Each structure stands twice: as structure tokens, then as C-alpha cells.
Image (tube, helix red, strand yellow):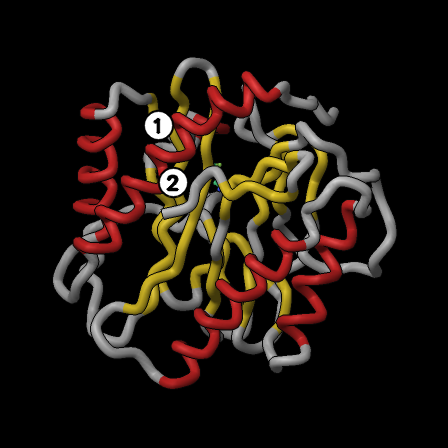
């Protein structure tokens, strides 16, 4: 179900969204070779506590951590561990908070030390595809205009779109309708309206789009071992166009 938000509700959503952006910015500054992803999770939890916020992912469908840390060939839902990051890794950090009953959700992928040219290109193209998608999040467009924008941008640059996970509406729940695939023809699906708030999140692979989930039940990895990147913003559709609520 798609739940439209009033301007007052969008104002309330600014708070968790801004907090998510601030925490991700801090985590980005902490990421370096030698740090473990469990340390990043702990830092995210400390910052959430300071902000008086509840983390959104812990306990969601049984997920045991507050942060998703997906390294290299991990696509999404990587679990924090004692794994130390090393120079040349890429790590996606995905984080959500609830404040005053409303959720915010965002993700970004960060190079650890110096990464290969191919990795760097993947990150740039994935981040750009998110902004290209957000440009389509305007009232009067159709939902799949967002999807198509990601696919066209990414595939013309030689990368592939993950099919198995999608973006989503967000508000008083982490996941509301509509589902937002990152591929498809333009001009399909519901008409976008002011008051929709969408978590748009392209997940893009270096090689083939196929992914599989590991035995831990969460970690999604590329089947071919190629790198994957993920960027996400929570975006409100307003009468004046898209507004990125999780802008860092
Ligand atoms: N940003 C992801 C999503 O929107 C993170 C969810 S992880 C989970 O689905 F543990 F909460 F499922
Ligand atoms: Co999300």
C-alpha cells in the first residue's frame, strides 16, 4: 500500500533522515584499513543512542545488527563481523533510524584506501545512477520511469542491475509500497504524486546481475564473485520536485 504523507509528516521524516545522513557521514570518516565491520556497527549504535533514535534494522525480520556492511562481492545485507577491512576493499554501509515514529533509510559505498580503477568506476556510476533516478521522482511521472533511468544509465556504462532486491516506500514503516525495481521499461506502474516518500536504492554489479544469499540467511553476494555497489536515499516527492531527505 502506498501511504501519502502530508507536508507536516514529511517535516517529521526530515528528523530521522537527517540523523541517518549524519551517522553515515561519521562512519564514512571512520572507514580505513584495519577497522572491523563490527566496530562500525558499534559506532552506528553509539551515535543512534546519542541522537535518541532507535536503529531500524536490528530485529527487523530477525536481522541481528543495526548496520548492514557489504564488502566487495557482497551486494546487500552483509552482517558486521570481526573481518578487518583492507586496502582496496569497497564497503557498502546501509543504515536506518526511527525517530518519533518515522523511518529514514540510506546507504553508500565507500572505497577503503586506494581501490582499482574498475571499483572506482563502479562506485561512481552507481552513485550517479541514484541521482539520475531521483531526477525522475517527480509528480506526474510513472513509477517505472525511476526504474528505467537506473537501468539505462548503468547498462550503457557496462555494469548490470541487481534484480533480486528493490527500493521501497518508507514512512511509519521501513518498507511500504510501492516496490521500486531498478530496471524495466519507462511509463509503467503508478503515477507519482506529491506526498510519496521513496527509498530509492540501486544495487549494481561489476559483472553479471545474478546474486545468491549465503547460508547465514542474509548476506547476498554476486554469483560470479564480481564487485557490487549500493547507494540509497530517502526521497520525498513534493510539488516542487524531489527532495532528498537523507542528503549528507
Ligand atoms: N536498506 C535496506 C532495506 O531497505 C536494509 C534492510 S536490512 C534489514 O531493505 F535487516 F532491515 F532487513
Ligand atoms: Co532501503
Give the camera-side residue of 163 and 220: 163
Q: Earlier in the sequence, mark 2 or mark 1?
A: 1
| Mark 2 vs mark 1, CA separation in Å | 8 Å
Indicate left or right for 212 with 27 as reference.
right
Q: Are marks 2 and 1 in contact (CB under 8 Å)?
A: yes
Quadrant of the snapshot with the N terminus: top right
Residue at left offset 66%, top offset 62%: 150
Residue 34, position as x, y percentages in the image: 12, 63
Residue 88, position as x, y percentages in the image: 27, 76
Task: List the residue tagged with mark 2.
Answer: 95
**Quadrant in which residue 19 is drawn:** top left
Indicate left or right for 179 with 199 as reference.
right
Task: List the residue tagged with mark 1.
Answer: 55
- Cβ of mark 2 under 8 Å from ligand 1: the answer is yes
Indicate left or right for 114 with 239 as reference.
left
Residue at left offset 59%, top offset 47%: 200
**Element type where label 2 sits in the image:** strand
Please tell me whether residue 227 is drawn above or below residue 42 in the rendered image: below
Give the camera-side residue of 153 and 135: 135
Amino acid at each position: 500500500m502506498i501511504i501519502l504523507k502530508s507536508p507536516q509528516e514529511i517535516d517529521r521524516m526530515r528528523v530521522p533522515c537527517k540523523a541517518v545522513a549524519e551517522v553515515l557521514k561519521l562512519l564514512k570518516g571512520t572507514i580505513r584499513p584495519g577497522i572491523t565491520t563490527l566496530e562500525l556497527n558499534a559506532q552506528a549504535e553509539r551515535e543512534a543512542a546519542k541522537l535518541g533514535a532507535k536503529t531500524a534494522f536490528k530485529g527487523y525480520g530477525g536481522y541481528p545488527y543495526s548496520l548492514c556492511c557489504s564488502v566487495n562481492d557482497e551486494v546487500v545485507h552483509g552482517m558486521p563481523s570481526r573481518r578487518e577491512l583492507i586496502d582496496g576493499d569497497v564497503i557498502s554501509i546501509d543504515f536506518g533510524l526511527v525517530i518519533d515514529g518515522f523511518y529514514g533509510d540510506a546507504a553508500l559505498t565507500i572505497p577503503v584506501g586506494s581501490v582499482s580503477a574498475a571499483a572506482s568506476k563502479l562506485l561512481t556510476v552507481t552513485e550517479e545512477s541514484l541521482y539520475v533516478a531521483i531526477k525522475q521522482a517527480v509528480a506526474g511521472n510513472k513509477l517505472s520511469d525511476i526504474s528505467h533511468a537506473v537501468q539505462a544509465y548503468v547498462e550503457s556504462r557496462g555494469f548490470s542491475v541487481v534484480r533480486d532486491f528493490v527500493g521501497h516506500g518508507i514512512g511509519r514503516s521501513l518498507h511500504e509500497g510501492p516496490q521500486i525495481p531498478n530496471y524495466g521499461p519507462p511509463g509503467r506502474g503508478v503515477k507519482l504524486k506529491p506526498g510519496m516518500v521513496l527509498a530509492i536504492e540501486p544495487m549494481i554489479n561489476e559483472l553479471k546481475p545474478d546474486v545468491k544469499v549465503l547460508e547465514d540467511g542474509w548476506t547476498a553476494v554476486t554469483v560470479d564473485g564480481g564487485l557490487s555497489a549500493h547507494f540509497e536515499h530517502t526521497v520525498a516527492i513534493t510539488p516542487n520536485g524531489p527532495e532528498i531527505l537523507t542528503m549528507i
